[in-house]
Image (tube, rainbow, N blue to C red):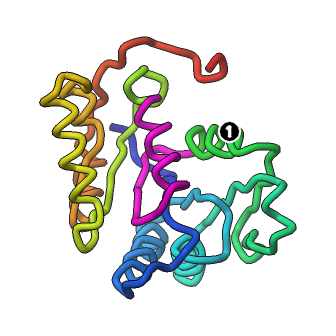
């Protein structure tokens, strides 16, 4: 695959109960800066999102946040990043994150993180997004999700090739190795994402 220039990071707007999650977000941000890869994310200054963005900026990285306008009055929008893009809706936020990224890293998160992840996986399945999608599985946070996806394949509700489009790794190095060797699988359709 072509050289990765931008990676979107999906993660929580909370810090969680384990310091390992915060450390994981900080390491991710720093590694992106060290590799000269632009970080794209949801634009918040709090939780794991804020920790990853701060770490990337402190290490000299380039961070682009994309946030819906209704979230900006809540004072969670990060004003200390390279660029903050304010959009009109959650859908537009995800569309821009996907368009501006060459790969996806998913850190621990809640409903919002899962929603972002599963929309992009649906786009992969349909052939709209043909870039690598990875999960950094810290402390076994995503073990049950991995088992659930395997069960979906076993029960005939998810094709194995689509299950394989989500890569699980316990290390950042493992994710980057996967990204570098990634070859897209054919989707069900070839769809223009502007028509979805």
> Which quarter of the image is occupied by the N terminus?
top left
Residue underneath mark 1:
91
| 155, above or below 70, in the image | above
Instruction: Residue 167: give x, y in percent of width and height.
Output: 25, 47
159 on left or right of 34:
left
| Element class at badge 1 | helix
Outermost residue to the right: 73
- Is 128 covered by the magenta stretch? no
Q: Is residue 185 above or below residue 97?
A: above
Residue 133 in sight from this viewpoint: yes
**Rendering coords of residue 194 (x, y %):** 66, 22
Judging depth in this view, the residue of 132 and 120 nearest the camera is 120
Q: Is residue 172 visible?
A: no
Frontmost residue, 4 versus 105: 105
Residue farthest to the left, as pictured: 154
Residue displayed at 34% across by 83% down: 20
Q: Is residue 5 above or below residue 47?
A: above
How crowded pointer 1 is (Cα within 10 Å; few <14, some 14-19, many 20+) is rated as: few
Name which residue lies at 59% across and 79% down: 54
The region drawn magenta spans 101-123
């Amino acid at each position: 695959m072509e050289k990765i220039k931008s990676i979107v990071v999906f993660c929580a707007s909370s810090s969680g109960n384990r310091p390992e999650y915060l450390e994981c977000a900080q390491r991710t941000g720093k590694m992106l800066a060290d590799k000269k890869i632009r970080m794209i994310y949801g634009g918040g200054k709090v939780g794991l999102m804020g920790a990853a963005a701060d770490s990337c900026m402190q290490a000299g990285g380039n961070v682009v946040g994309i946030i819906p306008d209704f979230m900006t009055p809540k004072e969670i929008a990060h004003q200390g990043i390279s660029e903050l893009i304010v959009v009109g809706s959650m859908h537009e936020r995800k569309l821009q994150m996907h368009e501006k990224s060459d790969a996806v890293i998913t850190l621990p998160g809640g409903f919002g993180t899962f929603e972002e992840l599963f929309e992009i996986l649906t786009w992969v399945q349909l052939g709209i997004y043909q870039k690598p999608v990875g999960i950094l599985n810290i402390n076994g946070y995503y073990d049950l999700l991995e088992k659930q996806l395997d069960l979906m394949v076993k029960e005939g509700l998810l094709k194995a090739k689509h299950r394989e489009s989500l890569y699980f790794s316990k290390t950042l190095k493992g994710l980057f190795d996967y990204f570098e060797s990634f070859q897209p699988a054919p989707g069900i359709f070839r769809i223009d994402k502007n028509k979805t």
